[in-house]
Amino acid sequence: MSANASADRKCYVDDKVSKVAWLNRSNIIYAGQDKWSLDPRVDLVTKGQLEYSLRIQKVDVYDEGSYTCSIQTKQQPKTSQVYLIVQEVPDYAGLLCCLRML
C-alpha cells in the first residue's frame, strides 16, 4: 500500500452475527456502528449486513500494523486479522532539483 492512498480492510460475516468490532493494536476503532476512533480519516463502510469494511484514507506509515475484525456470534467470538504495510512515496522533488543543476 502506498502512502496517501485509501485502504479498505474487509470483514465478511454471516447472518448469525450480533456484533462486529474493528481493533488496531488492541485499541477499539469501531464497535458495531459506533466510532471510537477520533481519527477523521477512518470510516466504517457497510454493504448490507454481511460486510463491514474499515476504510482508512490517506494512509501513512503510522497506520501500519495489525487490524482485527472481531465478530460476536451466539456461540463464540471469532476474529480475523490483516496486516497493513505502508510504503512511503519517495520525494522526487529534491532529486529533480539536483539533476537539473548537473
Image: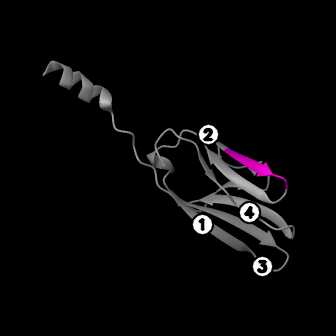
- Numbered label attached to residue 81: 1
**Residue beneath the point at 44% across and 47% down:** 61
Q: From this viewpoint, which residue is outermost toward the top?
A: 101
Q: Amino acid at mark 3?
A: Gln
Disc assigned to residue 41: 2
Residue 42 x, y percent position in the rendering:
64, 44
Instruction: Name which of mark 2 and mark 3 comes first in the sequence.
Output: 2
Instruction: Label 1: state its secondary structure.
Output: strand
- Residue where numbered disc 3 is placed: 76
Please provide the residue range marked out in magenta.
43-48
Residue type marked 4: Tyr
Residue at the (80%, 51%) spot, across then down: 47
Identify the main secondary structure in magenta. strand
Q: CA distance from mark 2 to mark 3?
A: 31 Å
What amino acid is at disc 1? Gln
Quadrant containing the C terminus in the rendered view: top left
* Crowd tier of the residue under label 4, counting other residues whose Cα lies within 10 Å: few below 14, some 14–19, many 20 or above: some
How far apart marks 3 and 1 lie (CA) works out to 17 Å
Label count reads 4
Tell me if residue 29 is in the magenta stretch: no
Do labels 4 and 2 touch, CB within 8 Å?
A: no
